[in-house]
Image: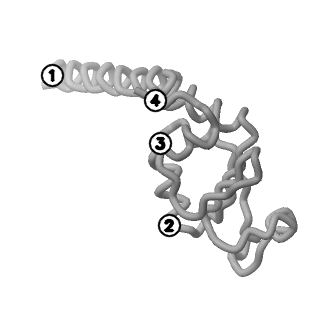
Amino acid sequence: MKRNTIIFFTIGGLLLLALLGYGVYSGFQPSKYDAFATCVKDSGAKFYGAFWCPHCQDQKTMFKQSAKLLPYIECSTPDGQGQTQICKDANVTGYPTWEFADGTRVNGVAQFATLSEKTSCVLPS
């Protein structure tokens, strides 16, 4: 019985290590949206949002793990009751708001085709 317990815990430990290793490995793999998100940022676009905004979360979800590469600007104060000065100065009145290098804006969740058109970035395949 003691030998079976040792084997069980050894196999369980190895499986756990394999799962952890895969999680770390997959976390370092580039997403298919990385190049697109980087291009959008490099184009001079700005993505104004608020942490409590469900549509902002939807926008980030479209980019999956590449959302961290977006030119995101947090507009909400930490208590969720006010707006940061940078967003006041930019006259942001709703979230999400995308502002592009040519000065145009898109309010609401921007589709990839719109972002591509406004930034000249190649759509992800």
Identify the secondary structure beneath mark 3. Answer: helix
Rendered position, 7 above or below 51:
above
Mark 2 surroundings: few (<14), some (14-19) or many (≥20) residues within 10 A = few
- Image depth: mark 4 or mark 2 in front: 4
Q: Residue at x 56, y 68 (%)?
A: 53
- Image depth: mark 4 or mark 1 in front: 4
Mark 3 surroundings: few (<14), some (14-19) or many (≥20) residues within 10 A = some
Q: Residue at x 54, y 63 (%)?
A: 108
Identify the residue position indicated by label 4 in the image.
124
Residue 125 percent location from the top left of the image: 40, 26
* Camera-nearest residue between 62 and 90: 90
Instruction: Report the disc number at residue 113.
Output: 3
Number of numbered discs: 4
Mark 1 surroundings: few (<14), some (14-19) or many (≥20) residues within 10 A = few
Q: Disc 1 marks which amino acid?
A: Asn
Identify the secondary structure beneath mark 4. Answer: loop
- Image depth: mark 1 or mark 2 in front: 2
Q: Disc 2 marks which amino acid?
A: Pro
Label located before the other in sequence (4 or 3) = 3
Residue 86 percent location from the top left of the image: 85, 62
Identify the residue position indicated by label 1 in the image.
4
Identify the residue position indicated by label 2 in the image.
54
Q: Residue at x 61, y 33 (%)?
A: 120
Rendered position, 112 above or below 121:
below
Q: Disc 3 marks which amino acid?
A: Ala
Label located before the other in sequence (4 or 1) = 1
Between marks 1 and 2, how big is the CA–CA gap? 50 Å
Between marks 3 and 1, how big is the CA–CA gap? 58 Å
Residue 88 percent location from the top left of the image: 83, 71
Label located before the other in sequence (1 or 2) = 1
**In the image, is 67 to the left or to the right of 18?**
right
Residue at the far bottom in the pictured view: 81
